[in-house]
Image (cartoon, rainbow, N blue to C red):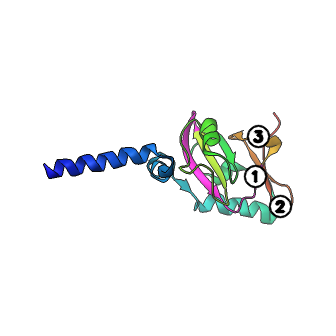
Amino acid sequence: MPKLSALRVALSVLLLCFSLPSCDLVRQATRQSMDIDYNDQGLNDGLVMLLDENKSARLSDFTSWDWDEVHLFNEYSEREYIEKVVGAPVIKSKFLNSKANLLVFELNGKPVKAAGVSPDFLRPEDHRVTFPANTVLKPSGGGILMLTVPAN
């Protein structure tokens, strides 16, 4: 019987912890999210090369996976907003706490990769968040690359 009693206490503590706001860390740790790749050398090196050489190129030139849409988020973007745009859990914390841009790539409406680009030097054209696969990166001065959509 002592083992059963200890199990009940442990379950009670766990349930109580999930219900208290102070246990947000427990909920955050068990929350689903995507693995964010901060070390995609092909992507990172390609973006830095565009800045260094003051050239434009398609974002797809620096990706090795299939995708048809990408979402751009900046530091301090709220988790709820990111999930609303992507339609799936992406980050665990309440805010994107990285000093990097977050690119979430989708294929047929489903996220296929999350990539962190550091430093935070990507900016959207016209305050857009979502871009198609033909998105072009253009240097805009000051160490910034603009994500732009080509005219039809």
Identify the magenta region: 107-123
| Spot occupied by residue 38 in the image (x, y as percentages of width and height) | 59, 60
Residue 118 in the image: x percent, y percent? 67, 61
| Amino acid residing under circle 2 | Asn
| Residue occupying the far bottom of the picture | 52
Q: What label sits on residue 54 in the rendered view?
A: 2
The kind of residue tagged 1 is: Ala
- Name the one closer to the observer, 67 or 78: 78
- In terms of depth relative to the viewer, which is nearer, 13 or 101? 13
Question: Hey, what amino acid is under mark 3?
Answer: Arg
Q: Position of residue 56 (x, y in %)?
A: 79, 53
In this view, the residue in front, 101 or 96, is 96
Residue picked out by circle 1: 57
| Secondary element at tag 2 | loop
Q: CA distance from mark 3 to mark 1?
A: 18 Å
Could you give the CA–CA distance between mark 3 and mark 2, rounded to whole angstroms?
Answer: 23 Å
* Relative to 75, 4 lies left or right: left
Q: Main secondary structure of the magenta part?
A: strand
Quarter that holds the C terminus? top right
Residue at mark 3 = 128
